[in-house]
């Protein structure tokens, strides 16, 4: 499909909308003052100049470890405009999870919230390349306004000049001293001119890196060109029919593709407004939707089930919400959910690596359990035999594979892992590792996972990294982390650890989980623990996780939910 991609970069899209929408609100974080399109554009220029002034060159990697807020968006916009690469770090990461991301990305600079300094300090001895850290305090950047600047050379720059310099000294006390690292406040990056930045950025350039699950190795950094990011936003705005009148309610973490590239970037494409909250809460969801005037939102995994479990209220249908993009929309409750909340559901299928090649249509019949139809404008999708890659008959079950029709409208590979890139691209099709089928009407159905991937609470987990943490415990001889089906609908998993203990007293499951809580993200801590005499292996001594998954939860499996062991999510 011939097309001009010269404007397919984050910086170009933001500049275009700033010129067109100017003082219109772009995004609002909770009850803080909204930032307009023009203000966001000016702050992005300032941050870009700030990082360039520190020596950041196009293509350099800058890690970003921030919660939902204005700062993570301004960091992304500013780094993209400087031609740098935003490396998004899950805010729950600690220990080897955090060390791996920083080392694999080769990041020499990191923007993080003060709350995550303890995790960084513990990881520093193992991350020697990190040289600069910029600390965000608790105060809202959304209340900052860039100081007035002389008109820049770009025509159509917003005329409603935001005024008032950002605050200077951080509000959380003196910054810590970290060995071998220069620590400075976030505000130092914004102490620059808001004039447009003269850096040429191409749609072919990497705009961001996000990390996804590993199975036989560490998490993989997905190299995401600007054209890849562009289609995330453009196609969401298209299929959801977003307009300037829409309000997109975003409660997922902005360090993931769903919230940042589908929801926020889709909002930018439409010139709409984003209403952002710190995170998802089933009990607050309806109140947030009503309070923000939301017209569109997304759910992921078990989110819809958790909302549906809330007690019915008279206000269930009293809102402006017209559409939910549900990934997935559980077939068991989809119709009842739409009737109860008077809202339309669409489904979709995608991955960080491949974009969203399958999407529901507003005017097409809703088929519960289906992800929608293939977006043939930009992608090819088919179902093949998972071992031979031969096409399977229509309606038959096989592996979902995908490829782009447009150069750079797909991931560029896994950072520093060429062998994993080649493996995923076997026979020139990207292998998703997901089982599915396509019906006679072209509707795609996700059925299950083929590879040993674990998806829990919207996170893609590395079984390898979970196993590494547990293997370091003195009482563990061998361990295999596997996915078992969650008792909740929504296609999610729970983590089960199958453990061969060392000789001597057997550790209590609670002891092992205490060990995990201190060394891995809360969402990676296993729910189930089972002690076994030995792990099934092939003649070459590879663990046969398929056999472990077939066993699932047995009579000998310890369940932390039933035992009353609570793993608390950081606030």
Image: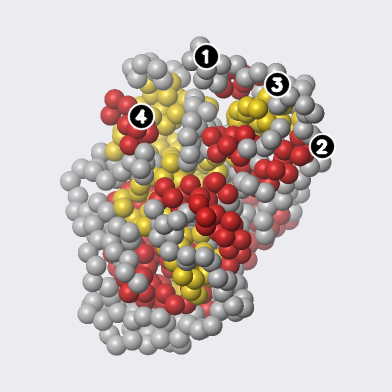
Tell me the element at label 1: loop
Number of other residues with Cα within 10 Å of mark 3, as a class: few under 14, some 14 to 19, many 20 or more: some
* Residue 453 coordinates in the image, percent (x, y): 52, 32
Image quadrant where one finds the C terminus: bottom right
Nearest to the observer: residue 117 or residue 366: 117
* Residue 303 coordinates in the image, percent (x, y): 62, 46
- Upstream in the sequence, badge 1 or badge 2? 1
- In the image, is 464 to the left or to the right of 405? right
- In the image, is 407 to the left or to the right of 342? left
Is any part of residue 258 visible from this angle? no
The reply to whether discs 4 and 3 touch (Cβ–Cβ < 8 Å) is no
User: Alpha carbon of mark 1 to alpha carbon of mark 3: how far?
Assistant: 17 Å
Q: In the rendered image, which residue does mark 4 sit on?
A: 423
* Residue 447 coordinates in the image, percent (x, y): 52, 27
User: Alpha carbon of mark 1 to alpha carbon of mark 2: how far?
Assistant: 34 Å
- In the image, is 245 to the left or to the right of 461? left
Identified at 47% across, 54% down, the residue is 127
Q: Which mark is residue 563?
A: 2
The reply to whether discs 2 and 3 touch (Cβ–Cβ < 8 Å) is no
Tell me the element at label 4: helix
Identified at 52% across, 14% down, the residue is 538
């Amino acid at each position: 499909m011939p097309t001009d991609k010269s404007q397919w970069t984050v910086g170009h899209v933001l500049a275009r909308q700033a010129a067109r929408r100017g003082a219109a609100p772009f995004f609002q974080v909770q009850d803080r003052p909204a930032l307009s399109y023009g203000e966001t554009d000016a702050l992005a220029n300032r941050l870009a100049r700030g990082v360039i002034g520190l020596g950041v060159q196009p293509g350099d990697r800058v890690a970003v470890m921030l919660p939902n807020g204005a700062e993570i968006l301004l960091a992304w916009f500013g780094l993209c405009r400087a031609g740098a690469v935003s490396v998004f770090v899950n805010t729950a990461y600690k220990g080897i999870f955090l060390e791996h991301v920083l080392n694999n990305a080769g990041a020499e600079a990191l923007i993080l919230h003060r709350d995550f300094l303890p995790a960084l300090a513990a990881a520093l001895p193992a991350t020697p390349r990190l040289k600069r850290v910029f600390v965000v305090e608790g105060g809202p950047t959304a209340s900052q306004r860039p100081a007035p600047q002389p008109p820049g050379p770009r025509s159509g720059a917003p005329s409603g000049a935001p005024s008032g310099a950002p605050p200077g000294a951080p509000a959380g006390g003196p910054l810590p001293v970290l060995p071998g690292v220069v620590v400075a406040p976030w505000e130092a990056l914004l102490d620059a001119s808001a004039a447009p930045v003269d850096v040429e950025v191409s749609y072919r350039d990497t705009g961001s890196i996000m990390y996804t699950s590993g199975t036989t190795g560490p998490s993989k950094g997905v190299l995401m060109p600007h054209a890849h990011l562009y289609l995330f936003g453009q196609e969401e705005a298209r299929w959801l029919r977003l307009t300037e009148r829409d309000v997109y309610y975003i409660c997922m973490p902005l360090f993931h593709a769903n919230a940042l590239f589908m929801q926020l970037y889709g909002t930018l494409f439409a010139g709409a407004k984003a209403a952002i909250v710190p995170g998802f809460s089933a009990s607050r969801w309806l109140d947030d939707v009503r309070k923000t005037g939301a017209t569109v939102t997304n759910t992921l995994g078990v989110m819809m089930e958790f909302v549906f479990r809330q007690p019915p209220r008279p206000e269930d249908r009293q809102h402006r919400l017209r559409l939910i993009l549900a990934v997935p929309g559980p077939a068991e409750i989809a119709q009842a959910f739409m009737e109860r909340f008077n809202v339309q559901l669409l489904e979709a299928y995608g991955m960080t690596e491949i974009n969203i090649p399958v999407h529901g249509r507003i005017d097409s019949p809703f088929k519960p359990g289906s992800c929608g139809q293939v977006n043939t404008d930009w992608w090819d999708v088919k179902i093949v035999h998972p071992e031979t890659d031969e096409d399977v008959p229509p309606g038959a079950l096989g592996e979902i594979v995908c490829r782009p029709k447009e150069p750079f409208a797909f991931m560029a590979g896994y950072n520093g892992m060429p062998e994993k890139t080649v493996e995923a691209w076997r026979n020139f099709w990207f292998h998703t590792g997901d089982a599915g089928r396509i019906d006679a009407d072209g509707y795609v159905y996700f059925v299950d996972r083929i590879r040993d991937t674990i998806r829990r609470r919207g996170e893609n987990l590395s079984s390898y990294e979970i196993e590494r943490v547990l293997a370091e415990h003195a009482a563990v001889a061998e361990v295999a982390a596997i996915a078992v089906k969650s008792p909740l609908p929504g296609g999610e998993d729970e983590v089960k650890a199958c453990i061969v203990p060392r000789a001597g007293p057997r550790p209590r499951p609670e002891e092992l989980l205490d060990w995990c809580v201190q060394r891995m993200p809360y969402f990676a801590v296993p729910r189930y623990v089972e002690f076994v005499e030995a792990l099934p292996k092939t003649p070459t001594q590879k663990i046969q996780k398929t056999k472990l998954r077939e066993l699932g939860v047995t009579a000998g499996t310890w369940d932390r939910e039933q035992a009353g062991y609570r793993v608390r999510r950081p606030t």
